[in-house]
Amino acid sequence: MEISELDAVSLAEALRAGDEKAATLVLEAIYPLVLRIVRNHLPRRMEEEDLIQDVLLKVLTRIDQYRGVAPFHHWVSRIALSTCLDALRKEKRRPELRWSELTQDEKVVLEELVSPREYEGGPAHLAAARELAERLLEALSPQDRIIVRMMDMEGASTAEVAALLGWGISKVKVRASRARKKLRALLVKLGEEVDTQ
C-alpha cells in the first residue's frame, strides 16, 4: 500500500493524536521503502533489522515534524538515509585495503579486473566481486559511500541525490568525482600488489 500525500497529512495528524491504527498503516506502507534504503546502505557490521527498526522509530517519533510540504516518501527517505549515514559514521572506518586481507575469491576477481584481457569471471565470481566492491567502498567516507551507491549502483540522478541529502547539485558532483577517483586509485594500488605477488 502506498500513502498518497493527502492521506499522509491526515495520517500524520492521527499519529500525533496517538491513533495506533494509523501507526500500523504508516509502518506497513513505508516498510518496503525503508528496507530497500537500509539494504543499499547497511554498514557491514550491523544487523539489517536493527537499522530498519531505528528508522521506523524515528519516523514515528518525528511525525510532528512532517508538515506535508515535501512528499511523505521523500521525508521518510531522508530519515532513512540520515540514519544509515549515522550508522556508517559510527562504524570504524578502514582507510586502506591490503592485498593480504582479501579472500582467495576476491583476489581472483581483482586479478581478472586488472589484467589486460577481458573479464571472464562470470556468475561464479559474482559474489566475490560484490564483496570486493563492498570492501573498496569501506575506504570512502560515509557520505561519499552513500553518493557512490546511489548514483553508480542504484542509478539515482545527481538531482535526486542532492534532494535526498539536502546538498547542492555541484557539491554532489564534486563529492562523486572525488569518491570515484579515490576508488580508482585504490583499485590501481591493489592491482600493483597483484603484479608483485
Image (tube, grey):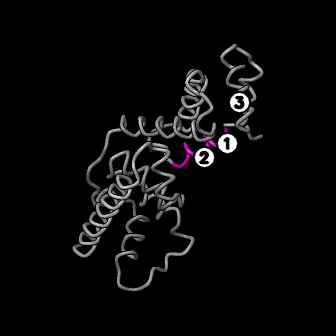
Label 2 amino acid?
Answer: Arg
The mark tally for this picture is 3
Q: Earlier in the sequence, mark 3 or mark 1?
A: 3
Cα separation between marks 3 and 1? 11 Å
Label 1 amino acid?
Answer: Pro
Q: Is residue 38 magenta?
A: yes
Residue on which the image places disc 2: 36
Whether label 1 touches label 2, CB < 8 Å: yes
Q: Is residue 173 magenta?
A: no
Q: Is residue 70 left or right of residue 148?
A: right
Q: Which residues are magenta?
A: 31-40
Residue on which the image places disc 3: 26
Prevailing secondary structure class for the magenta stretch in the rendered image: helix
> Which secondary structure lies at badge 1?
helix
Residue on which the image places disc 1: 32
Q: Is residue 120 left or right of residue 95?
A: right
- Residue 60 falls in image quadrant: top right
Q: What x and y, as percent, mark residue 30?
A: 67, 37
Between 104 and 59, the one lying in front of the other is 59
Q: Classify the position of the N terminus by image quarter.
A: top right
State the residue at coordinates (36%, 74%): 111
> Which secondary structure lies at badge 3?
helix
Packing grade of label 3 (10 A; few <14, some 14-19, many >=20) is many
Q: Is residue 21 left or right of residue 49?
A: right
Q: What x and y, as percent, mark residue 31?
A: 67, 37
Q: Is residue 81 left or right of residue 167?
A: right
